[in-house]
Image (spheres, rainbow, N blue to C red):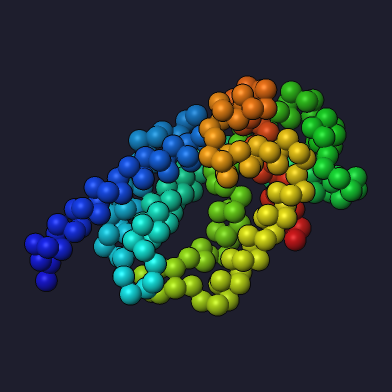
């Protein structure tokens, strides 16, 4: 039976966590093409929060805030996956880039420069940078893309993650950390400023002395390096 007290608690949790939806939407939007509307992300996140309110089980061990954050972000990512906005030609070039990048850096034994990557792709530097802009992060973060192939190893309404899932999660994170450490210094700094320090693109551009669009290109390039390395590992 749904009591009046339960309704009050439900409404209180909803109100407390609504600002979190906008923060998550803004954090995702800056990694995506300009055509992705903020309101669409917020709407998807709101549905995720409502789902979290219905499915949350306090006995599972996770706090509601943790559970809600996961559900909201998952709902936004599902919304982005469903759009499949990237043209086939761009997606094909993005896959080819990751494959060529892995082969090139294995041959060189070091991170390749932009000019070296462009030459490997038989592109001019301008064409290569445009490809980076067109495929800025695909539509997911590298870790999220990685775990999407194996199932999200998170606590849910069924209970906490299994020991195997916890081990898989730890191994994936260690691979990702190792991959970031192997990035060129400027890309490593960019990833740290963005994911650890929480700076936005404009702020990162000021630190690096480049434009926001250039930050997007460098971020996209870093993601390609990580995806290629993770795929090889």
The structure residue drawn at horizontal position 79% and vertical position 25%, both measured from the top left corner, is 124
Extreme residue in the bottom direction: 163
Picture coordinates of residue 187, whole percent (x, y): 71, 38
Picture coordinates of residue 188, whole percent (x, y): 70, 41
Q: Is residue 142 left or right of residue 13?
A: right
Q: Nearer the viewer, residue 66 or 169?
A: 66
Extreme residue in the left direction: 4
Q: Is residue 126 above or below residue 163?
A: above
Q: Is residue 56 left or right of residue 134?
A: left
The structure residue drawn at horizontal position 60% and vertical position 30%, both measured from the top left corner, is 204
**Rendering quarter of residue 136:** top right
Residue 108 in sight in this render:
yes
The structure residue drawn at horizontal position 42% and vertical position 56%, both measured from the top left corner, is 70
**Rendering quarter of residue 9:** bottom left
Q: Nearer the viewer, residue 125 or 198?
A: 198
Residue 33 in sight in this render:
no
**Rendering quarter of residue 128:** top right
The structure residue drawn at horizontal position 75% and vertical position 44%, both measured from the top left corner, is 183
Picture coordinates of residue 134, whole percent (x, y): 61, 32
Q: Quadrant of the C terminus?
A: bottom right
Q: Is residue 95 above or below residue 201?
A: below
């Amino acid at each position: 039976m749904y009591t009046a007290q339960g309704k009050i608690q439900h409404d209180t949790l909803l109100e407390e966590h609504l600002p979190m939806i906008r923060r998550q939407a803004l954090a995702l939007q800056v990694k995506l093409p300009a055509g992705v509307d903020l309101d669409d992300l917020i709407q998807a996140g709101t549905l995720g929060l409502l789902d979290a309110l219905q499915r949350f089980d306090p006995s599972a061990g996770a706090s509601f805030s943790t559970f809600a954050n996961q559900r909201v972000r998952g709902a936004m990512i599902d919304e982005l996956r469903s759009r499949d906005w990237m043209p086939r030609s761009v997606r094909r070039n993005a896959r080819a880039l990751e494959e060529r990048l892995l082969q090139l850096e294995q041959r060189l034994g070091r991170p390749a420069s932009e000019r070296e990557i462009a030459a490997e792709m038989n592109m001019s530097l301008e064409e290569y940078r445009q490809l980076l802009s067109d495929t800025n992060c695909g539509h997911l973060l590298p870790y999220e893309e990685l775990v999407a192939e194996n199932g999200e190893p998170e606590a849910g309404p069924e209970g906490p993650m299994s020991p195997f899932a916890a081990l898989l999660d730890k191994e994936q994170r260690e691979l990702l950390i190792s991959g970031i450490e192997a990035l060129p210094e400027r890309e490593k700094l960019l990833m740290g400023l963005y994911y650890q320090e929480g700076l936005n693109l404009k702020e990162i551009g000021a630190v690096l002395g480049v434009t926001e669009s250039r930050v997007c290109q460098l971020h996209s390039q870093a993601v390609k390096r990580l995806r290629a390395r993770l795929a090889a590992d």
